[in-house]
Amino acid sequence: MRSFLKCFLIIVLCVSLASGFTTLLFSQEKNPLGQYATLSEFQKVTGRKITKFNEAPMLAELVRQGKLPSVEKRLPEEPAVVDPVEEVGQYGGTWRRAALSPSDTMIHARLGYEPMVRWARDGKTLIPNLCTSWKVTEGGRVYTFYLRKGLKWSDGQPFTVDDILYWYNDELLNKELTPVFPAWLAPAGEQVKVEKVDNYTVRFRFKRPYSLFLEYIAVNNASFASPKHYLQQFHIKYAPKEKLEALVKEAKRDFWYQLYQDRATKFSNTELPVLAPWKLAVPPTGPRAVAERNPYYWKIDIEGNQLPYIDRITWDMVQNTEMITMKAVQGELDMQGRNLAFKDFTLLMENREKGGYQVYQWQSGETASAVFFNQNYTKDKFIASLLRDVRFRTALSLAINRAEVNQIIYLGQATPTYTIFPKASLQNNPEIRKLYEYNVAEANRILDSIGLTKKDKDGFRLRPDGKPIQLTILTNVGYAIHPDVMELIAQYWNKIGIKTAVDAITSSLWWPRINSADYQIAGYTLGSLYPGKFLLTYSLFVIPNSTSCYYGTLWGLWYTSRGKAEGSVKPTGDALKIIANFDKIIVSTSQEEIDKLTDEILYLWAKNLWAIPVLGFFNFPIVVKNNFKNVPKEGTLAYPYMSPGYMNPEQFFIKK
């Protein structure tokens, strides 16, 4: 990374010397990665030295009052240096947003993206974050991370390897807090071991090579740390028994681990120390949640200004996505893409001048909607047998008028379905492309061929017991576009005699239904089939290795628990082959082998149609107020990037 940046800037410098505009061009050159690991790296690459640190006026006042140490004492020895997208920002202001639920604020994830290793702003490169560097040894089995000396939690307490060991020994290995050890930290079923080298050096040791580890850290926003000094007062291992029991009773909980999980939740506990730019100050239990700047945040800009620029973030808690769109139109949102609906793109564009905002178009970071056939559904044996029949799934895919969906819902902007595949070999495979054609006659022929020939007076096909076949698509109202698409799909399936209803539920009800496999079909996004390792680290839509795999949640439970969890179901056939390929990839050190196994996974997944993609990719509207700066005009909302987290939202600012 350093070599690339150095060569890049040398070329720019030579060109500028020849043009006679050395100072101007050098000052305008930006770090394509967005962030330098340390002050020393910044100086080495740019030739500039930061000798003085500055802070927000609200913090400077607290320093004057003796309520806060000086900025020099709050920053680590080597703060990370963030290069602003457009310009060095101004301090102050409130970033106004809206959310549908407490977790929807994303203060813990998208706006608190601070893993050990993170995606850079280019969306391709992994760079140090909580650590200043890392080292991989013993053939990919051992990863050593070097933490920032002097880095502090938001309450001023030191962040050290002891916080990582606490997370590992007292949270991860505690069965009451973590009943199922995270599968991504147990490649091939063998749990990672975490070792302390010294206060600022930690080692992760695996029994076999682990090719995906760094990517998994970035995708999972994994800091590997919990504030031991705060959370141990709620932990059964550390807290006096009588005191802990009193706290549990006071919180109206039955068990200590329920209280602990409450206190460890970043989006609801205002007392929990964090490492993010902003810390929750007013919980999202009322009409408005508030987060305020972290006075010990450990990043600065290229002029030594401690970040973030913005003082606070507020979220108006609303009931539906339509209210969020209306707030945007009225100019009441400063920067937001989350929960805005693509169907409202024209409305948003028409009200730009009135609302004082611009509308950027970022890549959605996901495909258009998809339907997932629950292979673990058991409540109705006949329906379950249909959902497991690839011929039935093929007929339903052929019945979807994708061109019409594109025009009605996506304004003709979505790409063809086959473009979801990262390689041309799969995009052009006639066997795969045929599955996504609109062919009602063939759909009806297939349904007749599997014995669904009898119909009632309304044309709906009948079960063996004489009742109409009834399907229900479960969808989430928190994502406005999917319920609309599912309503159209229900109409298409009704036309071929499969009576279909849509059950649109709130986000709070969605995951309990998904994780318990209590649904027939789920209507949601397919994510993105990113090429290479990125696909594999965010693979829940393709590989049944997670309880969030919509076509096989109990298969995912089997994988994550290695078959030990009650209610888990072992995959069979091609699904088991996909799992086997994935396990081979994890421990492979050969990119050629990884690519070959990945291609086979995608082929097996596509031909089985456990998930039916509707369309390919589309752009998404992002509302940005005219005075809200340093937001890239091009970007992605992709969840694996924790967008806009990978864009360094700490460098966003409000221009006065």
Image (cartoon, helix red, strand yellow):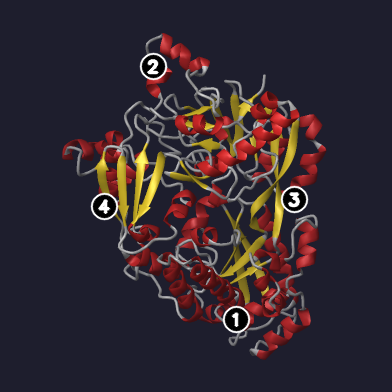
Q: Is residue 467 visible?
A: no
User: Which residue lies most toward the front here?
Assistant: 18
The numbered disc on residue 343 is 3
At a point 57% along the width and 20% down the height, the residue shown is 91
Q: CA distance from mark 2 to mark 4?
A: 36 Å
Q: CA distance from mark 2 to mark 3?
A: 48 Å
Residue 644 percent location from the top left of the image: 58, 41
User: Which residue lies most toward the left here?
Assistant: 241
Q: Nearer the viewer, residue 299 or 326?
A: 299
Question: First in sequence: mark 2 or mark 3?
Answer: 2
Dots 3, 1 in contact, CB < 8 A: no
> Mark 4 = which residue?
174
Question: First in sequence: mark 3 or mark 1?
Answer: 3
Pointer 1 local density, CA inside 10 Å: few below 14, some 14–19, many at least 20: some
> Mark 2 = which residue?
68
> Mark 1 = which residue?
390
Residue type (three-letter) at the residue carrying disc 2: Leu
